[in-house]
Image (cartoon, helix red, strand yellow):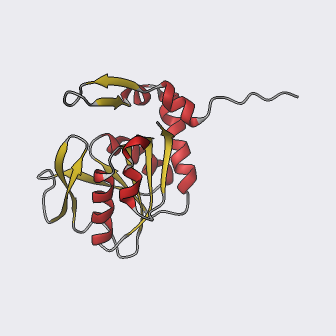
Amino acid sequence: MTSFVGPSVAEVVASRLRDIPDFPKPGVLFKDFTPLLADGEAFATVVRDVATRHTGSVDVVVGIEARGFILAAAVAFDLGIGMVPVRKSGKLPGLTLSRSYALEYGTAEIEVHADSFRAGERVLVIDDVLATGGTAAAACELVESAGAVVAGVDVVLELGFLEGRDKLGERPVHAILTV
């Protein structure tokens, strides 16, 4: 009996990414993951991969603005748990916690509602791309400053040459595809 083994999740991701040169500024090669989102089967494959890896080990999922929202919401739904958005500064009403950070083409600040987490809650942080690590590290610091625990950081794509993983310290990090 012969069984067919389809493409790996990394191969699915690689086949659904496109490069956009000089975005958001000259010299940056942007890895666009919207073609992956537009392909229902590929998107479901990624969501199932992340959810399966974290079933029973997390209490809430954090999605980093903006593309991280999409994946985080789908993973949270699949796991039957809540999703907390980490947003750009000034986008959330009410009391917030904030962190500034450097990224590959400038600086930014992100926020989360101060009451988003319970003490000790296990949090999965999700984003589309891990580049220099500034955004993910700032999101992790927000989670931890609210008293929760970062159980893991999952990204669809890691730009390994930028060494962003180094900014995340001992936190568990998983990238579906590293280039």
Quarter of the image with the N terminus is: top right
Q: Nearer the viewer, residue 83 or 36?
A: 36
Residue 54 pos. (x, y %): 53, 56
Image position of 138 (left or right of 98): right
Residue pictured at 33% horizontal, 61% vertical:
140
Instruction: State how many labels appear.
Output: 0
Query: Going 21% across and 62% down the picture, which residue do you hit?
Result: 113
Q: Is residue 60 left or right of residue 147?
A: right
In the image, residue 82 lies at what x, y percent? 38, 57
Q: Is residue 120 above or below residue 1?
A: below
Residue closest to the eye, 174 or 122? 174
The residue shown at (43%, 46%) is 155
- Please tell me in which quadrant of the rendered image residue 28 appears: top left
Write the residue at 46% across / 26% down.
Answer: 16
**Depth check: 82 or 119 in front?**
119
Tell me where residue 142 appears, x and y as whole percent: 27, 64
Return the x and y of residue 52 as percentages of the image width and height.
57, 50
